[in-house]
Amino acid sequence: MSGFHGLVLLAALLLAIPAAGRELRIGITQFPSNLHPNIDSMAAKSYVLGLVQRPLTTYDRDWKLVCMLCTELPTFENGGAVRERTPEGKEGVALTYRLRPDLFWGDGVPVTSEDVRFTWEVGRHPLSGVTNAELYRRIWKIDILDERSFTLHVDRVTFDYNAIGFGLLPAHRERAIFAADPATYRNRTLFDTAPTDPGLAFGPYRIVAVTPGSRIELARNPAWRGPAPAFERIIVRAIENTAALEANLLSGEIDMIDGTLGLALDQALAFEKRHRDRFTVFFKPGLVYEHIDLRLDHPILSDVRVRRALLLALDRELLVRELFEGRQPVAHSFVSPLDRMLAAELPRWPFDPERAARLLEEAGWRLGPGGIRRNARGEPLRLEFQTTAGNRSRELVQQVLQGMWRKLGIEVTIKNEPPRVLFAETLGKRRFSGMVMFAWISSPENVPRSVLHSSEIPRPENNWSGQNYTGFADPEVDALLDAIEVELDEERRRGLWHRLQTIYAEQLPALPLYFRAEAHVWPKWLQGVEPTGHLAPTTFWVEHWRIAS
């Protein structure tokens, strides 16, 4: 009987394996807000663009910095990096890169140094609306040495001086569009108006069809010169409800689920117990910081006593123990326990409802009719709370937190939105009124300049660039962020990191929740998927994915 069962199971698995050259269908929980490599920051977009593009450099699965588009990382040791003086007399660095000779846009045009220069021009423009404008502003000059070699002149020497996360733009397709009106470029780029244009892709795949909010279809890029990818086509489907995502996997409508944008840990643990015979469930602890951004110019949240009380009211240890079997550590800082720069001793706000109540009393919020706190003017302590609609785990956590705050007399109303709306409009343009729960995904020892520096607050004047959605502005933090980057001595840098985390823990521009473990799910017949646990998506190495023989 057991032998018969084994034969049936083997037959089922064989039937599930796609024939060579067939499509692979991937499920994720978000649809990209746009497809431009440098406008808006969203994990869903990084995942999709990993199939069609690559950054100049990235961190691999071993958390080592590697070249993706260049032939060799420039270093002081090999002579590719040279210290120099900027026009202002500051110490800077000249970095010489050589692009790989096998890079071609999908329309056959070579990827060249001119694409690098154009990307830099767009990134530096004050009205272009790129997310990480600081990266491009620091490069004060580019020298084009030849078609594939160029030197970046950077205005400071940082500890990660040769990590350049350029998302290249095709000069031959985008330059005229940008030149026509830089201020409206973000609304006219081909990446969104004509995403199937082959001249936008130089990776193993190119986009051939887009159904907004639903799916993106990709086909092999004939201009790709690297290892041949295993699948002729890849379909990326956005299924925002995680219960529906799991159902689609079991029914065969999709083949795999990405961990960064897939099942929550609690859901994946239960899934593994039921379906380990059909699927591999790979749990990857990483640098994924689940937290709640607070609108600091809100009249209630501008008071640090209220922010501290909000955190003291939460039993986060109970939350991770009951919902995630204790596998996701409580966060006390934005730095993960896996990161070497985690500060050991920090101000902490453990579950203490009595202390939270005292802080609220000090801040003028006293219990009133119906158990809701009110101020001297009779206004209720009421806050709006948002997250990504359809994410079952987040919505469950949200309801648990709402209940904990209600016990303290804080009225929290839930108003969730689809991820593409939440990240592009509500967060990106600071249109939220209270609290938003989401995750930051970082690279190793990632300096959080874009989320904490006062110059990175999105505003109409900078065309909504930057990711400091809370509006946090602290002169000491600005100075620390500047100092950390240029401190090459690791131990001295560690001290600066400690002070930065201490201020964060004291001021609480966001409420730390926990560090997520990603649950990647793929079929038994798929090999070569290697989750990184950090910012770089698995799709950066899709050409190494293989069908088991």
Image (cartoon, rainbow, N blue to C red):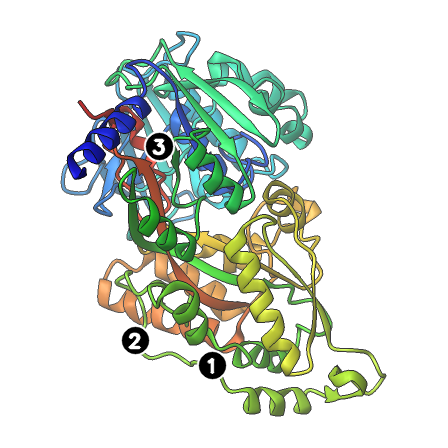
For residue 344, which numbered disc appears in the image? Answer: 2
Discs 2/1, front:
1
Q: Where's residue 483, x and y in %?
A: 38, 62
Are dots 2 and 1 in contact, CB under 8 Å? no
Q: Residue at x 22, y 35 (%)?
A: 5
Q: Name the secondary structure under disc 2.
A: loop
Seen in the image, is 338 located left or right of residue 439?
left
> Could you say which is closer to the camera, residue 309 or residue 86?
309
Q: Outermost residue toward the front? A: 1
Q: Is residue 191 above or below residue 448?
A: above
Q: Residues within 10 Å of mark 3 (few under 14, many from 20)?
A: many
Are dots 1 and 3 in contact, CB under 8 Å? no
Q: Quadrant of the C terminus?
A: top left
Q: Residue at x 78, y 88 (%)?
A: 368
Are dots 3 and 2 in contact, CB under 8 Å? no
Three-letter amino acid code at the position of disc 3: Thr
Which residue has dot 1 on it?
A: 349
Q: Residue at x 59, y 44 (%)?
A: 419
State how far apart marks 3 and 2 are (Cα).
Answer: 34 Å
Three-letter amino acid code at the position of disc 2: Ala
Q: Is residue 258 above or below residue 370?
A: above
Which residue has dot 3 on it?
A: 539
Res 340 quadrant in image: bottom left
Q: Outermost residue toward the right? A: 377
Q: Quadrant of the N terminus?
A: top left
Label located before the other in sequence (1 or 3): 1
Q: Is residue 275 above or below residue 326?
A: above
User: Is residue 27 among what the camera can see?
Assistant: yes
